[in-house]
Amino acid sequence: MEYKTVIYSRHYECDAYGHVNNAVYLNYLEHARGEFLKEIGFDYKGFVDAGYGVYVIKISISYKNSALPEDKLDIYTTLAKRRSASGTFNQVIKRDNDIICEAEVTWASIGTDGKMSPIPKEWDVPGLHI
């Protein structure tokens, strides 16, 4: 499943060169993953409130073009891999047909003991499977 999130870049996110600072894309990607989880019915807030976590353990980003203030950006999120206690999202940020950046985001499920463990069955949803 590919999920699209739309965001508009803001002036204050830009650096001295007038384009969106590279670090800001991490926020965009995080927002889009949260929207993806809502769409598939994963109760992230409830999961965290119960003492569990889904932590990002690795992000690899390839920057292709610059986003500018007030650009409409489409963020495409796909679950690319799923293991019992971890997985990988592929994400692409586009402005029209131009790819702004591509990211591979690896996550891990953390149990109530603070250690990596499978997502409990009561929290697992079909959308978290490939």
Image: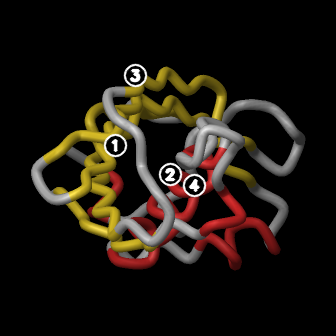
Picture quadrant of residue 127: bottom left
Residue at 33 percent of width and 58 percent of height: 75
If you read the primary sequence from the N terminus, does the residue marked by circle 3 or circle 4 appear first? 4
76 sits to left or right of 50: left
Amino acid carrying label 1: it is: Gln
The CA span between labels 2 and 1 is: 7 Å
If you read the primary sequence from the N terminus, does the residue marked by circle 4 or circle 1 appear first? 4
The CA span between labels 2 and 3 is: 13 Å
Quadrant position of the C terminus in the picture: top left
If you read the primary sequence from the N terminus, does the residue marked by circle 2 or circle 3 appear first? 2
Secondary structure at badge 3 equals strand
**Which residue position is annotated with label 1?**
91
Q: Which mark is residue 49?
A: none
- Residue count near mark 1 (Cα–Cα under 10 Å), binned few <14, some 14–19, many ≥20: many
Which residue is most to the right? 113
If you read the primary sequence from the N terminus, does the residue marked by circle 3 or circle 1 appear first? 3
Q: Nearer the viewer, residue 83 or 102?
A: 102
**Which residue position is annotated with label 3?**
62
Are the two marked residues, 2 and 1, in contact with CB atoms closer than 8 angstroms?
yes
5 sits to left or right of 94: right
Residue at 65 percent of width and 27 percent of height: 57
The CA span between labels 4 and 2 is: 4 Å
Secondary structure at badge 1 equals strand
The CA span between labels 4 and 1 is: 10 Å
In this picture the colour scheme is secondary structure
- Where in the figure is residue 80, as x and y percent of width and height? 26, 35
**Which residue position is annotated with label 2?**
29
Secondary structure at badge 4 equals helix
**Which residue position is annotated with label 4?**
30
Are the two marked residues, 4 and 2, in contact with CB atoms closer than 8 angstroms?
yes
Whether residue 11 is situated above or below residue 65 in the rendered picture: below
- Where in the figure is residue 126, as x and y percent of width and height? 28, 63
